[in-house]
């Protein structure tokens, strides 16, 4: 009996290492360890073994089963390893990727969004107003003289009913103050329109971002701190800014903001980026007039306002030299901003 | 406005400043510097004398000159000009001189003859207009001296003066402001004093003003016996430097005073006037021949300076062709007046005629300098043209008082600036601007200031606060910040929703577009923009037919984008745009709505080296995209087709109609050069937002028991709409059915495997109980009942 078991073990251990496929391995398992396999057949002779030898034979039987199982497992592992190795043999990391869909947000929206998110971190909430506006909201309430050139039909789009396409998003200043008591701390991104021929530097429809903060005790120092923080968060901590005294009918004092930016040639240049100022008392008075109260009386509140062109901001950010690229939506252009 | 540094230096010592420093001073005074130009004779251009001139041996049109220029030996110069004679003094550019246009003179041979420099015209050197040959210099000039000894170098600044500062539209005005900004003193007085000039009220035969609102003050001074000639070099240089063409001494003097003081003047030839001056409104349709040679037709609100028979000047805008000063003039009538700014602006704009005069009058000149300007011009005329002036200036009307006193409250100023200023920090800048403190009021922080007549912009306290801030410099004001907590507004939520939707679509390969909101009438199509009944909004004053209306929908713009990209060779089109659309409703109201539009065409997925040529996207692809931005799967309710759309469906989420979806007629697509199906959708973004955010998201418990699926295939008519199956499965009352999903659609045009007029639709149905693991028999029972009901309610045959 013991010899028979030795013989089975020898046969198995001789045969298993030369097996070269998983089905053959399974056949070998059935042959040696299966219910009708050789080991089972040998095990059937157990009952004929004298009682005193049963223990030794039983032990031997286990040893043989163990040895064959190990050999089968080892072979199984070897075959699996070989198969794995075979399966990755053809991987070529230098093959091109299989593209997943890839679109892009418009660069103008990306630029606007960066600005909006920066200002939101600074506690400004969004506000809006109609794009078809009244002359009151676009000019009168913003302290623009009745014969100001901007009101001309040659500069501004009008409708038959006397309304117009807003020439700036400053209209939202008025809209917001008319409907909300102070304090207001808002930004208003949106379209503005001017009756300009479209060329490399002009669009008849463009995008602005307006900001307004009106509350008791708002100062020029606050305006300066706000815009410095804002532009540095957009263009980097070390961005140099300057405020040039300027004139707008709806703010006083008024400033234009320049950023010192490096051009492609490497020379730094002051680039005009925004207009700003302290809300003119006449604007606050106009708001009081429509509100019918004195919530915005210039003695009670002061405020600052600022505005910038998003097309210009995008052009500066991306080095775009022709503004028309921003409205043509050529995929070869848009793809660059994915 | 052009500003000459030499001229400015008459009033202010700027010798210690570089050009950049002066530009910075101007900039921070609020006067934008748009350009800087260096004028005057270039270096190495010398006054030379022509000693001889001989015919060039090899060129008929050239001569060879010997010129003396202060060098050891005369230079030999080849020259093409003919206008000189031997002995003339001319400018000679020596080798190394760089002429305007970055042209450097070198020694060289011209047609075989050595030339040691170039003799120049005035225009080549940009020192005068003269270009008919060499610039012939006066004989008294010194040979060997640099040309810059007669044409001094100058720096000219091109300034953009803001409309509130007409006082800066002159050299004296800019000098005043710069002096204040620098904390320096002017060399001379702040204005040209007028008190000493005798004035005499004009009688009606001399000056009659019939429109005193438009012309509150008119003055005239007669100067007899003048000799009108060329102006002296210094005067010509002054005018040339700032881009004015010298005409004759009298006209040049009026221009000089204009640019010196900002007060426009006009000189009439007395001999060409018929009697006294009549300042009146023009007759409707009155014709006027201006000195630009154009005839203008005036209206009855245009102010005219007339004599007794005709108009001689459009007040404040332009003089007449027939009454101006010429070489034959002997007696001059010098006009200096104050015209009402809106009146001048109106006329100037209506006629499309802008002059240095109208530019200043319409912004506002200093009414108290009218006589002073007349006097300065008179003095110069007497000096340069001789003659004798009337003893007094004839005056009609009165200089209006446009400035007064303004109270400054230091505490308000401090809180506006965010910095408390000392009395000195307030008084200093205001005094330096020519304001006079008339009193310090009882309250310790207030003071009253008298505004000089040239500062028309200083009317309110805030106007003075601006001046203090401007001169103090924002760089000297601290940067601070303050603000309170703010709620998200509804705009914030809409903005975020819009960005989220866009991001989802971008993640699926869509390119976000930004198109112009103005479109052409021909782009508008009822069938493509039918979300809201109404009409597109038309502009009253369109700039072009391409941009005549506000867009009533986003699809016209996206179709244009698709067309453009296809023509540029793009194959796969996936575009999205969100933004405002405008509709005029039947009731005449204008609506502004936020919409979202999608356009898809071409391969459904990007072709790559594993998938060969992917098939074109179909309406189902677009629908799949729409499902990703919708809180619930969308439903498309087929509508009748129309001219534009071969497939047209109402886009609904639940019961709410939110948009339109469809496929363009192939012919329409081909007109855009697109051969693949063009799929479009336009959605009311506000409705989508509302649906997406109205229900709080509550999680469903994860299934704890296994599901069992059963697949079914159904044969139906080819025209059978899948939607009927969907409705059936949605409305079934089989509690164990938890999901149904279509997984196959089969058609066979050949009729071999399936009749050509039939199709096969296959669904996978999922059964599950939330309480227990289902037995096969239970599922078989439920499935059997469901199929029975299905066969009863729909014309299907189970396969």
Image: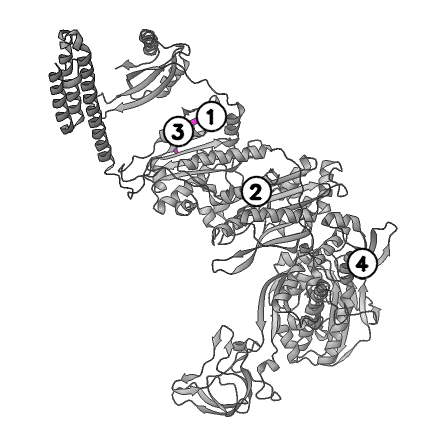
Q: Which residues are magenta?
A: B638-654
Query: Secondary structure under badge 3?
Result: helix
N-terminal-most mark, 3 or 4: 4
Residue placed at 13% from the left, 17% from the top? Answer: A5
Residue at mark 1 to residue at mark 4: CA–CA distance? 69 Å
N-terminal-most mark, 3 or 1: 3
Same subunit, tags 2 and 3? no
Q: Chain of mark 2?
A: A
Q: Chain of mark 1?
A: B
Same subunit, tags 3 and 1? yes
Q: From the top left corner, tell me how far across and down residue A253 is, in percent.
A: 69, 52
Q: Chain of mark 4?
A: B
Q: Nearer the viewer, mark 4 or mark 2?
A: 2
Q: From the top left corner, tell me how far across and down residue B434 is, in percent.
A: 78, 62
Residue underneath mark 4: B401
Q: Chain of mark 3?
A: B
Is residue B643 within the magenta segment?
Answer: yes
Q: Say few, some or many: other residues with alpha carbon within 10 Å of mark 4 (under 14 / 14 to 19 / 20 or more).
A: few
Residue at mark 3 to residue at mark 4: CA–CA distance? 73 Å
Quarter residue A86 falls in: top left
Q: Say few, some or many: other residues with alpha carbon within 10 Å of mark 3 (under 14 / 14 to 19 / 20 or more).
A: many
Residue underneath mark 2: A118
Same subunit, tags 3 and 4? yes
Residue underneath mark 1: B631
Q: Which mark is residue B623?
A: 3
On the picture, is B240 further left or further right than B67? Answer: right
Residue at mark 4 to residue at mark 2: CA–CA distance? 49 Å
Is residue B321 within the magenta segment?
Answer: no
């Amino acid at each position: 009996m013991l010899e028979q078991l030795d013989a089975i073990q020898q046969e198995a251990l001789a045969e298993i290492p030369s097996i070269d496929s998983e089905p053959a391995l399974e056949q070998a398992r059935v042959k040696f360890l299966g219910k009708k396999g050789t080991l089972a057949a040998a095990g059937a002779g157990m009952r004929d073994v004298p009682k005193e030898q049963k223990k030794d034979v039983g032990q031997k039987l286990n040893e043989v089963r163990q040895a064959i199982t190990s050999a089968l497992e080892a072979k199984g592992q070897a075959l699996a390893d070989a198969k794995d190795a075979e399966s990755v043999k053809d991987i070529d990391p230098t093959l091109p990727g299989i593209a997943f869909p890839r679109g892009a947000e418009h660069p103008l929206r990306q630029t606007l969004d960066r600005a909006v998110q920066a200002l939101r971190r600074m506690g400004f909430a969004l506000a809006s107003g109609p794009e078809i506006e009244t002359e009151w909201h676009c000019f009168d309430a913003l302290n623009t003289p009745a014969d100001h050139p901007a009101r001309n039909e040659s500069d501004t789009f009008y409708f038959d009913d006397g309304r117009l396409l807003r020439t700036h998003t400053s209209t939202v200043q008025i809209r917001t103050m008319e409907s909300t008591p102070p304090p207001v701390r808002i930004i208003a991104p949106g379209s503005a329109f001017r009756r300009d021929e479209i060329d490399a530097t002009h669009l008849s429809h463009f995008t602005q971002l307006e900001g307004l903060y009106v509350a008791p005790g708002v100062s020029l120092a606050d305006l300066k701190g706000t815009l410095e923080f804002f532009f540095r968060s957009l263009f980097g901590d070390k961005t140099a800014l300057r405020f040039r005294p300027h004139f707008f009918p709806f703010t006083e004092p008024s400033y234009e903001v320049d950023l010192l930016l490096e051009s492609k040639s490497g020379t730094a240049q002051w680039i005009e980026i925004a207009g700003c100022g302290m809300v003119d008392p006449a604007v606050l008075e106009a708001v009081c007039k429509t509100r019918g109260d004195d919530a915005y009386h210039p003695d009670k509140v002061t405020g600052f306002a600022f505005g910038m062109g998003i097309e210009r901001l995008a052009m500066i950010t991306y080095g775009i030299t022709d503004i028309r690229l921003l409205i043509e939506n050529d995929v070869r252009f848009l793809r660059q901003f994915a | 406005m052009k500003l000459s540094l030499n001229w400015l230096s008459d009033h202010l010592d700027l010798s210690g400043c570089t050009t950049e420093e002066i530009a910075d001073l101007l900039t921070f005074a609020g006067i934008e510097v748009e350009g800087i130009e260096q004028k005057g004779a270039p270096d190495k251009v010398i006054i030379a004398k022509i000693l001889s001139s001989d015919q060039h041996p090899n060129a008929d049109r050239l001569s060879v000159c010997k010129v003396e220029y202060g060098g050891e030996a005369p230079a030999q110069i080849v020259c093409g000009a003919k206008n000189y004679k031997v002995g003339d003094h001319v400018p000679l550019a020596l080798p190394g001189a760089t002429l305007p246009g970055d042209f450097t003179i070198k020694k060289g041979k011209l047609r075989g003859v050595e030339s040691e420099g170039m003799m120049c015209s005035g225009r080549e050197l940009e020192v005068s207009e003269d270009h008919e040959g060499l610039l012939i210099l006066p004989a008294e000039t010194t040979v060997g001296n640099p040309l810059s000894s007669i044409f001094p170098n100058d720096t000219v600044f091109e300034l953009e003066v803001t409309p509130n500062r007409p006082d800066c539209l002159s050299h004296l005005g800019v000098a005043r402001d710069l002096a204040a900004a620098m904390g320096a003193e002017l060399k001379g007085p702040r204005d040209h004093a007028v008190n000493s000039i005798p004035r005499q009220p004009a009688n009606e035969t001399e000056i009659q003003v019939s429109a005193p609102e438009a012309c509150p003050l008119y003055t005239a001074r007669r100067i007899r016996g003048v000799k009108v000639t060329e102006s002296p070099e210094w005067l010509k240089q002054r005018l040339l430097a700032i881009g004015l063409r010298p005409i004759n001494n009298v006209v040049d003097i009026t221009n000089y005073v204009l640019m010196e003081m900002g007060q426009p003047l006009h000189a009439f030839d007395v001999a060409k006037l018929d009697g006294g001056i009549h300042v009146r409104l023009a007759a409707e349709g009155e014709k006027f021949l201006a000195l630009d040679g154009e005839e203008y037709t005036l209206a009855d609100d245009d102010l005219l300076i007339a004599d007794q028979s005709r108009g001689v000047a459009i007040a404040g805008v332009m003089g007449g062709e027939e009454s101006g000063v010429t070489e034959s003039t002997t007696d001059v009538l010098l006009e200096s007046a104050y015209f009402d700014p809106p009146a001048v602006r109106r006329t100037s704009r209506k006629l499309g005629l802008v002059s240095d005069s109208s530019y200043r009058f319409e912004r506002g000149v200093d009414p108290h300098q009218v006589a002073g300007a007349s006097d300065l011009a008179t003095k110069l005329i007497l000096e340069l043209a001789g003659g004798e002036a009337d003893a007094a200036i004839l005056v009609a009307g009165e200089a209006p008082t446009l400035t007064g006193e303004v109270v400054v409250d230091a505490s308000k100023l401090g809180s506006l600036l965010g910095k408390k200023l000392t009395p000195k920090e307030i008084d200093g800048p205001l005094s330096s601007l020519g304001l006079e403190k008339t009193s310090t009021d009882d309250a310790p922080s207030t003071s009253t200031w008298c505004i000089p007549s040239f500062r028309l912009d200083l009317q309110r306290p805030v106007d003075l606060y601006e001046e203090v801030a401007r001169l103090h410099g924002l760089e000297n004001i601290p940067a601070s910040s303050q603000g309170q907590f703010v709620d998200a507004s509804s705009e914030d939520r809409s903005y975020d929703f819009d960005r989220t939707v866009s991001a989802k679509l971008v993640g699926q390969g869509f390119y976000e577009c930004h198109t112009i909101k103005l479109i052409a009438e021909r782009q508008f199509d009822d069938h493509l923009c039918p979300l809201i009944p109404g009409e597109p909004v038309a502009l009253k004053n369109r700039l072009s037919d391409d941009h005549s209306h506000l867009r009533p929908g986003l699809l016209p713009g996206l179709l244009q984008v698709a067309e453009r990209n296809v023509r540029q060779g793009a194959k796969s089109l996936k575009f999205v745009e969100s933004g405002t659309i405008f509709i005029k409703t039947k009731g005449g109201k204008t609506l502004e709505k936020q919409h979202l539009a999608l356009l898809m065409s071409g391969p459904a997925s990007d072709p790559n080296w594993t998938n060969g040529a992917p098939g074109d996207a179909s309406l189902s692809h677009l629908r799949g995209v729409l499902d990703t931005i919708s809180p619930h799967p969308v439903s498309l309710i087929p509508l009748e087709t129309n001219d534009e759309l071969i497939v047209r469906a109402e886009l609904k989420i639940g019961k709410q109609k939110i948009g339109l979806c469809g496929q363009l007629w192939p012919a329409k697509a081909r007109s855009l050069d697109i051969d693949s199906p063009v799929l479009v959708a336009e959605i009311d973004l506000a409705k989508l937002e509302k649906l997406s955010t109205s229900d709080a998201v509550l999680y469903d418990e994860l299934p704890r028991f296994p599901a069992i699926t059963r697949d079914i295939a159904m044969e139906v008519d080819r025209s059978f709409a899948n939607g009927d199956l969907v409705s059936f499965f949605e409305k079934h009352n089989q509690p164990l059915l938890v999901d149904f999903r279509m997984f196959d659609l089969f058609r066979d045009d050949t009729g071999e495997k399936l009749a050509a007029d039939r199709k096969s639709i296959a669904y996978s149905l999922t059964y599950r109980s939330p309480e227990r693991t289902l037995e096969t028999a239970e599922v078989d029972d439920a499935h059997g009942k469901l199929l029975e009901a299905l066969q009863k309610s729909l014309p299907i045959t189970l396969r």
